[in-house]
Amino acid sequence: MKIATAAYPLSFLDSWAQYEDKLHDWVADAVQNSAELLVFPEYGAMELATLDGAETAGNLERSLFAVSDRLGEADAVHARLASEYGVTILAASGPAAYDLPEGVTRPVNRARLFAPDCAAGVQDKQIMTRFEAEVWYVAPGGPLQLFDTALGRIGVLICYDSEFPLLGRALADADLILVPSVTEAISGFSRVQIGARARALENQCVTVMSSVVGAAEWSEAVDVSVGAGGIFGPPDRGFPETGIFAQGEINQPGWTYAEVDLAQVAEVRRDGGVLNRRDWQHQLGRDGAVTITPLKAEMG
């Protein structure tokens, strides 16, 4: 299978037609290069707020709900493109209104997966960054999903989620883990990339990182984004020695591509040089406990 992962610049949109044309061009370009799985980044849907004007796009609270109001229409475009081109698409995540148990409605950060047979699923971000929790008041959403697709079993860890091993371990049966991201500095990009590579190592699977790139001066939230696409696996038999299938150039918009054979995932799990996925239970000892042991004076 050929994977395409995006380094995606946000646009100030003049019309809905411009948005549709942009998505069509991106998907058509990936399909022309024989991609079967297309991965867009976290909060790439924030450009939809510009359709309500600069004042709304520049207002943190109003921009969240402006995007939420248009996600249904955006989903219809993605579903149509997935069906028309016969590809699987992870749409750029965006805020979706969500009724919390406390009786209030707040946005969650939601990615949506579309298959060519019109099947679809959603994955909400599990753990909020400080900006999301303390400034935007974006809430954690529904639980982790593992999608059984014609391409294989697919999980999604949105950006910060990829930095938590237990979330990755919950997706231990995934062949592919998709990591849509947006980060404002090399440090943030590096954290997510390290997380994506670590999840590929410990689960002996393929991870796919996408990024928002470039400036969006109209937004207080995603005004500057630094990143690149990347496709990773365990550095083991049947995989690149570095674990890197492909890595895009920082802040260079476009697709990063890699050919991946998921039969190698099953094989490395069965007979890899190491068996991280199988041996997970040994990382903290048999019962998961850690013994605190004081140092003793050296015996003379």
Image (cartoon, rainbow, N blue to C red):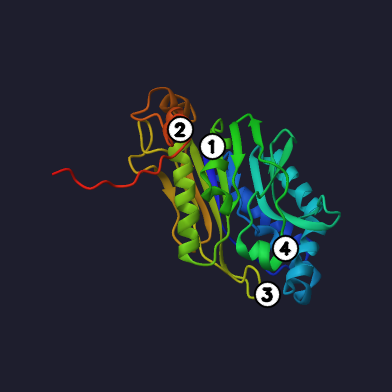
| Residue at x-position 66% and y-position 50% | 125
| Amino acid on which the number 3 mark rests in the picture | Trp
Q: Measured from the top left, where is residue 186 in percent x and y? A: 46, 64
| Amino acid on which the number 1 mark rests in the picture | Arg
* Mark 3 to mark 4 CA distance (whole Å): 20 Å
| Amino acid on which the number 2 mark rests in the picture | Trp
Q: Which residue is mark 1?
A: 169
| Residue at x-position 66% and y-position 73% | 220
Residue 14 in sight from this viewpoint: no
Q: Which residue is mark 3?
A: 218
* Mark 2 to mark 1 CA distance (whole Å): 9 Å
Q: Measured from the top left, where is residue 208 in percent x and y? A: 52, 45
| Amino acid on which the number 4 mark rests in the picture | Tyr
Question: Answer yes or no: do the residues labelled 2 and 4 have beta carbons within 8 Å?
Answer: no
* Mark 4 to mark 1 CA distance (whole Å): 27 Å
* Mark 2 to mark 3 CA distance (whole Å): 45 Å
> Which badge, 2 or 1, is on the more N-terminal residue?
1
